[in-house]
Amino acid sequence: MIVITTHKNTDFDALASVMAMTLLEPEAVPIIPKSINPNIKAFLSIHKDIFQYQTPDQVDVDAVEELFVMDVNRWERLEGLQALRERDGLQITIWDHHMHAGNIDAQAIHQEEIGSTVTLLVRELKKERKVLTPMQATLFLTGLYEDTGNLTFSCTTAEDAYAAAWLIERKADLSIVNTFLKPAYGEKQKDILFKMIESANRTKLNGYKLSMSRVEIQGHVESLALVVRMYREILNVDAAFGIFSSNDGKRNIVIGRSNAATLNIGSIMKGLGGGGHPGAGSALLKSVSPDAVEELILNLVSGNQTSSIQISDIMSFPVATVDVGTTMQEIAAILRDKGCTGVPVLDNGKLAGIISRRDFRKIRKESNLKAPVKAYMSRDIITIAPGRSPMDASRLMVKHDVGRLPVVESGKVIGIVTRSDAMLYFYDQLPD
Ligand SMILES: [Mn+2]
């Protein structure tokens, strides 16, 4: 007998992978553990006739000669098949997208770093030109979307997106997919949001309107970040914090959201041992009382007069500058050599303008290249002080449609910050 199985607490990717494998191995018997996620239970209660399977207790384990293990590579996560662990001559094949080492000794391992296991199976189905029913396509897409967060998690690869497209072509029903994927904002989240609003503790600190709420939660609750975002929007404060504590008060998850450019949640969370980006972040504090957590946050906010990361931290320096007398031809060579798209122009050491590649569009004929830069440079220069924040720089660049800002201190250019510096900063700050 050939069997296909997957891990306990079966999720959609696991179920989808098992069912996809049955299309490739029609002789094999799919075995689904009895412990399955609630949304899988709901799905199977409706699709029982379409996706037939057995539970481990229905299987004659002694008769098993070949085993396919989907979405997992550890024995202890399988249900009721422990006897196979010591079986000699058992043929085992693993299909998995988790890259950590396992303890199932398989003859064939299909393990790749990809968004979902079912993506690997879709590749095979495609290759073998298998025909899918819309229900099969729907189940496979649900698995793919669950593990990739609808293709938004950072584990998502281009191949996951192609596989999703292929399944949609095969008439995967998106409204069914939506119905069965756990809604991010469900009853549990609504409950927490209401409790947060009820217990909101609003203060004004350093000119910022803040709100903080403490809620006791049991176990793991998903989408708390979404709840805190809604909470901030409803209370319309500059920054909002949710402190989610376990009932013994020993484990506190802090999630913050800010709408104020100068109040960097990422650096506040860093101060608590967590992280994030300017607008949002989180931290986990163990063995600290919720009172102490609240106190810590207030201290960090009051110490946060300016953004902790300043322009001087991300700017490039020394800056290549040119004199107003430099010819356009020389400028072209400098830009090419330095690999930059623009440089500040100085007149007697003072910032007089800025010349960028864009300005070369104004050149009509060859002889123009002999003219000095002051004829072509832009004179209304937008500068920034070294103590300002990366967010301020981005705002200025968008507002004035410029790609670089000279950083000026007491009338002198000490650096330059470009669009790509700002981009690098923000992308680096984004949590995985
Ligand atoms: Mn998976």
Image (tube, helix red, strand yellow):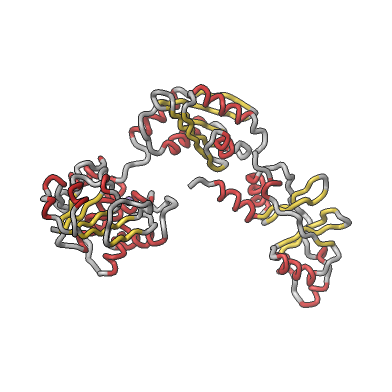
User: Residue 137 or 372: which is nearer the viewer?
Assistant: 137
Q: Residue at x 34, y 58 (%)?
A: 111
Dividing the picture into quarters, in which one does residue 19 lie? bottom left
Answer yes or no: is residue 230 visible: yes
Which residue is rendered at x = 38% and y = 57% of the image? 114
> What x and y, as percent, mark residue 223?
40, 39
Q: Quadrant of residue 37?
A: top left
Asked if 267 appears above or below 353 in the picture, the reply is above
Can residue 72 be seen at all in this image of the molecule?
no
Front-lying residue, 133 or 217: 217
Farthest-out residue, right: 348
Q: Is residue 76 left or right of residue 401?
A: left
The image shows residue 251, relative to residue 6, as above or below, that is above
Report the quarter where the N terminus lies: bottom left
Expressed as whole percent of the image width and height from the top left, the position of residue 176 reads: 27, 49
Residue at the bottom extreme of this rendering: 366
Is 223 positioned to the left or the right of 137 in the image?
A: right
